[in-house]
Image (tube, rainbow, N blue to C red):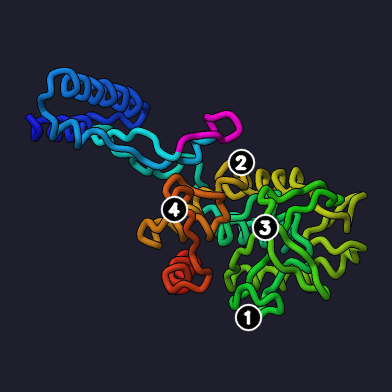
Amino acid sequence: MFGGIWMFREGLEDLADPTGGDSALSTAAACLKKFYLHHAAASGVNQELATALDRSRLPSKADRQRKLLGHVTRSLPANPLAPRVKRRRHPKMAPDGAREGMLKVATFARDRLVVTWLDDGGFRIGELCGLHLVDLHLRENADCGECRSPHVHVCHRHNNPNRARAKSKMPWSIENGTVTGGLIKRVSPAMIHTYFDYMTRERRAAEPTHQMLLVHMVGPGRSEPWTSAAARGMLRRTGIRAGFGPVNPHAFRHSFGTAVLDASGGNLLVARDAGGWASTAVVDEIYAHVDLQDPAFDAALRKVWGLS
C-alpha cells in the first residue's frame, strides 16, 4: 500500500495541466494525505505511511504575505504527494531577434543604449531612467570597492526630476563623490560601448544642466531628463519599425532572467542577483547570497553576453 501511494503521486504529475490543473491536483493530494493521516490516527494502521506523510516546511514569502503583518509559524505542513512545481518560460519575453532588429532601426545612440542595457542587464525601465552619472562605475576596480568588474549602483531616489524611481530600496550613500550600496548590477562590454557612443555623440551635444544619464534629444524638452513614459514610447515605436510590433521594456527583463537561469544550469541564486530580484521561494527560505565574482556567476553572464 505504501508503494501504491507513491505511484499515485507519479500519476498526479503525469496528469498535471500547465493551464491550471496543478492547483486541482494539489487539492486532491491534500485530501488524500488527510484521509490516510485520519485512518492512521483512528485505527493505528499504516503508521509508517503516516510518518512519511506528516512533514513540514519553512514558510515562503508568499506564505508570509498571506498572514497579517507577516506573522506566521516557523513551520507549515508539507505534502509529499503534491505535484512538483515546474518552472516554465515566461510567456511575455522579448521576441527572438528583437535586440538586433531594433538596434538597426533605432533613431539615436541613446535608444541603442537603452535596448542594449535592457537586454544585457535586465534593468527595469524605472531603474534605467533613474540612473545618474555618478552611479556608473564602468571600469575595473572602481573606488567603491564593492565589485571588481564594471558595474552600476541602482539607487532609489524619490526626488528625480523625471520621477523615475528604482523599485529596489537598498540603502546607499555618496562619500567623496563615490556611490556605495544600492543594488549592484554587472555590465557587459556591449553596454559600456553603447554608453561611450551615446556620451560622446549625443549627450555632450545636448548640453544638459543635470547629472542624470538619459536625456531628451529633440523637442521643447531637449536636454531634460528622459522619462520612463518616453522610453516606453520609443521602444514601442522602434519595435513596430523593426517588424516585431510594440515591445514592452519588461519583456527584456523576462528574457534576461530566463537566459541567465538557463546559462547557469538553473542556479536560482545567480539568477536572483543578476537581475536584482528580491528573492525566490527557495532563496528566501535559506537567505543565501551569491558572490558577484563567483565563477559560475561570471560564466553565466559572459555566456548571455555572447563572450564565451
Among the two numbered marks 1 and 4 on one chain, the one whose residue lies closer to the N terminus: 1
How many angstroms separate mark 1 from mark 3 (CA)?
A: 22 Å
Residue occupying image coordinates x 90% and y 63%: 208
- The residue to which callout 2 is attached is 246
- Return the residue nearer the eye: 200 or 293: 293
- The residue to which callout 4 is attached is 286
Figure quadrant of the C terminus? bottom left
Residue 34 disc label: none
**Residue 175, located in which quarter of the rendered image?**
bottom right
- The residue to which callout 3 is attached is 114
Residue 180 relative to residue 20: left or right: right
Q: Is residue 190 shown to the viewer in this render? A: yes
Question: Callout 4: few (<14), some (14-19), or many (20+) C-alpha neighbours within 10 Å?
Answer: few
Kindly indicate whether the residue at mark 1 contacts the one at mark 2 (C-beta within 8 angstroms): no
**Residue 210, located in which quarter of the rendered image?**
bottom right
- The residue to which callout 1 is attached is 140
Q: The residue under label 4 is which amino acid type?
A: Ile
Q: SS of the residue at dot 3?
A: helix
Q: The residue under label 1 is which amino acid type?
A: Glu
Q: Where are the magenta residues, as a range?
A: 65-73
Image x and y of residue 67, in percent: 54, 30
